[in-house]
Amino acid sequence: MLNTYVVEGGVGKCTAFTALLPKLKKKSEVQIYTPYIGCFASNPDVKLVLEQTLPLQDARIMASDNIFYSEPYKSNFQFGKQHIIESYCEHHGVEYDKSMTGKLYTEHHKEAVKEWLTKNKIGKYIMIQFSGGQPQMGFNANNQYTSLNPNRNYQPFLAQQVVNMLREEYKDTTIINCVLPNEPHYNDTIRCDLHWTQLHEMLKDAEGFVAIDSCLQHFSPSANKAGVVVWGSTRWTQFGYEQNTNLQFHMSDEWDETKFNDSDPRNNMIEPRLIIDEYKKIITTKDK
């Protein structure tokens, strides 16, 4: 049997969907039809990945026994109680458990990442991402930066303070800013111009990361890398992972739904010193 799954959305949703693939493969052969083929390329549980610019009537799709489509954002996920992976599981009849995380296969980028790091004379490095919300597909660097969800972004003034503190604390470590070319840049960092799939491969060997709810935090379980994530207008219980230190202005270790308002601009106003202190805890634990 051959099933084709239509997986839309951004990099985060597509990465989350990969958590289902080992269980879906047990039911049938799997094809994926998606705008983000990099999330599924080289995955041993996927027979074929088809780019979404192809017509849905492509002969390889029409040869399927079933074509499945789901959209968590228009389902029970809206109640705010399901993780994005849990929602996908509900849609596709897969048993969910909290250990399920996405998995990307980017080892073929290892040499390109090594070459970029060598070219830029980078040894140890920390990866940061304080802005996002732009679709990678069809991106044009000449366009003015407009985020689809600006309340996820960490304020540039505070972000620069975090960078300054990291530079002071880790003088022998390069800080790599992992944002698109038209997004905010910071003093004493180097902007990474690699493809987003290469960022995943780079994250594997990073000392750690500090980010918002965007690519780096989506990739972190797959890259087996813990970091600090600053949360604004989204819930870490829906998009985040327990391996990371998740910070929100109105709550600490445990999520408290009564304190969450997605339009509150204070949500991600985390003191830079707190971010550094939490990052140091992660690094100390890693080095033991």
Image (cartoon, rainbow, N blue to C red):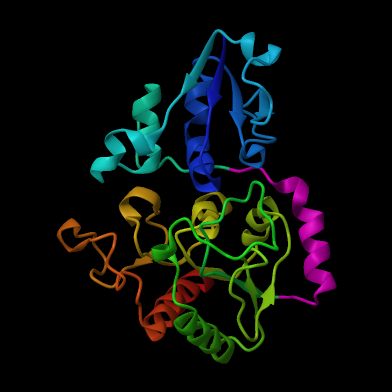
| The image quarter in which residue 126 lies | bottom right
Does residue 50 appear left or right of residue 145 in this picture?
right
State yes or no: residue 107 in magenta. Answer: yes
Q: Position of residue 50 (x, y in %)?
A: 67, 27
Q: Can residue 18 be seen in this view?
A: yes
> Where is residue 221 shown, x and y percent of the image?
50, 52
Taking the image as shown, residue 122 lies to the left or right of residue 62, namely right
Instruction: Using the rendered image of the protein, determine whether residue 102 is visible from the camera's viewpoint.
Output: no
Q: Residue at 40% x, 54% y: name it.
A: 241
Q: Residue at x 39, y 50 (%)?
A: 239
Q: Is residue 183 left or right of residue 278?
A: right
Q: Residue furthest bottom?
A: 168
Q: Main secondary structure of the magenta part?
A: helix
Q: In which quarter of the image is residue 118?
A: bottom right
Q: Please determine whether, in this image, residue 208 is positioned above or below residue 196.
A: below
Query: Residue most toward the front?
Result: 143
> Residue drawn at (44%, 72%), measured in percent from left and top?
154
213 or 142, nearer to the observer = 142
Span highlighted in magenta in the image: 104-123
Q: Where is residue 192 in the image (x, y as percent from the top left)?
A: 70, 67
Question: How many discs mark residues in the rendered view?
Answer: 0
